[in-house]
Image (cartoon, grey):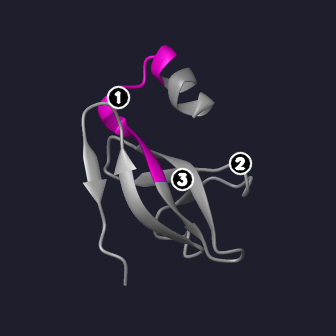
Amino acid sequence: IAKYFTLLDAGVPESALALSLGFYQPTGEAHITLTVTLGNGEQLVLDNLVTAVKTVQERRDLNAVLTMNRQTLTVYQLT
């Protein structure tokens, strides 16, 4: 969450940022990550459990339940 506000303060538009709540598959525990959408539409995941910045597609170890910022809330159907 601190990364979210740090990037806002640095001038990243809020529409490019979303907190994602989901489950981290290796442990099954609930976990929050920050997703940053770049100008080309690519979405990057910033996470304190995995030090490498990877795309949403590369993070197969996360199952998102919802994403949110102060403007939007998206809820995903669990499969």
Nearest to N terminus: mark 2 or mark 1: 1
Q: Is residue 48 above or below residue 1?
A: below
Q: Residues within 10 Å of mark 3 (few under 14, many from 20)?
A: many
Which residue is found at the position 70% from the left and 77% from the top? 26
Which quarter shows the C terminus? bottom left
Q: Which residue is label 1 attached to?
A: 14
Q: Is residue 59 magenta?
A: no
Q: Position of residue 7 (x, y in %)?
A: 52, 25
Under circle 3, the secondary element is strand
Q: Is residue 17 magenta?
A: yes
75 vs 31, left or right, is left
Q: Residue 6, labelled with which disc?
A: none
Which residue is found at the position 35% from the left and 28% from the top? 14
Q: In this picture, which residue range is highlighted in magenta?
A: 8-20
Q: Which residue is label 2 attached to?
A: 48
Q: Position of residue 61 (x, y in %)?
A: 60, 74
Distance of label 2 from label 3 (alpha carbons): 10 Å
Q: 28 or 9, which is in the foreground?
A: 28
Under circle 2, the secondary element is loop
Question: Looking at the rendering, which quadrant does residue 74 occupy?
Answer: bottom left
Amino acid found under the numbered disc labelled 2 = Asn
Q: Position of residue 46 (x, y in %)?
A: 59, 47
Distance of label 3 from label 1 (alpha carbons): 15 Å
23 vs 66, left or right, is right
Which residue is found at the position 32% from the left and 48% from the top? 40
Look at the numbered discs 3 and 1 and tell me whether their residues touch, using CB distance below 8 Å.
no
Q: Position of residue 75 (x, y in %)?
A: 29, 60
Amino acid found under the numbered disc labelled 1 = Glu
Q: Residues within 10 Å of mark 1 (few under 14, many from 20)?
A: some
| Label 2 vs label 3, nearer the camera | 2
Q: Which residue is label 3 attached to?
A: 45
Question: Looking at the rendering, which quadrant does residue 6 occupy?
Answer: top right
